[in-house]
Amino acid sequence: MNEESGDPVNQRLAACIATLTPVLHGAIREAQVTEEELWTAVRFLNEIGEAGEFMLLSDVLGVSVVVDHITHDTDGAGTDANVMGPFYVPDAPLLDPPYALAPAGEPGEPLEVAGRVTDAVTGSPIAGAVLDVWQADVDGLYANQVPGRDPYHLRGRISAEEDGSYRFTTVTPPPYEIKKDGPVGRLLYALGRHAFRPAHLHLKISAPDHVGITTMIYFAGDPWLDSDTIGAVKPSLIVPIDRGNGAGAADPAPARCRFDVTLRPVDRA
Ligand code: BEZ
Ligand code: FE
């Protein structure tokens, strides 16, 4: 209890601070941080706050990935979760079949994404599971980063069929750099680190009576898989892209990838 006000102590906060404090002191002693360096760090954190980059700082320090793991670990039962990132927009349009995330004429390599959504315990198909997908365009930009663009460009919700299968067309997203014109960018630069994320699609998958997940699909062969600037790549989320008869053919088939999803039932979560 707070002695002055009589209000109850925030026990959870107290436990976190009690854990953090000795670790922080130990790190500062080990690195022999000086007073001048402390002032530099305080100025930096003020700038981070002014720029609204605390979450981005958490991302590049790998904190977001650790917290995502603590919060959403499926312990091997069900498709792995992955961080949501800053570009999700709720209420994307519910698309009609045949599902096309990219409008006609969208620049980039045509890509077909298909798979099945099944129950992680029984293996039964989950008919009507909804996949809420969002991605960057060929320039590595999300719709909400481009002034004046339709906020739901390259975003949409897709339903799985009776047998749990789903299929949609889009364009292959490129690797892209995270925001680097602010204090987080300066930090990366000072550390000699790059700002790249490997190419990926973001998905939120939900179904009645199942634990929904937020995750990403990555693509085999991407040069940034091993050094993602936010360290979010999980091997289970990397799929090959089949380029079949290739872009040089007279009537090239779209590139294809397959991503199967398993969701845990709520009563076994
Ligand atoms: C993203 O994948 O959209 C993302 C995640 C964390 C920081 C920046 C971008
Ligand atoms: Fe992203």
Image (spheres, rainbow, N blue to C red):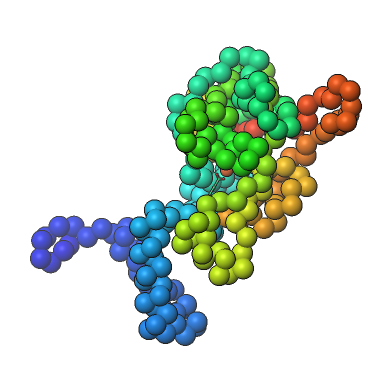
- In the picture, the quarter occupied by the N terminus is bottom left
Decide if residue 44 is on the left or right side of residue 223. Answer: left
The vertical placement of 81 against 24, above or below, is: above
Q: Nearer the viewer, residue 78 or 114?
A: 114
* Residue 180 placement (x, y as % from top left): 53, 56
* Residue 136 placement (x, y as % from top left): 60, 38
Q: Is residue 130 in sight in this rendering?
A: no
Whereabouts is ligand 2, in terms of quadrant? top right
- Image quadrant assignment for residue 114: top right
The vertical placement of 155 against 231, above or below, is: above
- Image quadrant assignment for residue 238: top right
* Residue 45 placement (x, y as % from top left): 39, 65
Who's the residue at 35% across and 64% down the image?
46
The vertical placement of 8 against 176, above or below, is: below
- Image quadrant assignment for residue 74: top right
* Residue 169 placement (x, y as % from top left): 68, 24
Who's the residue at 70% across and 48% down the image?
235
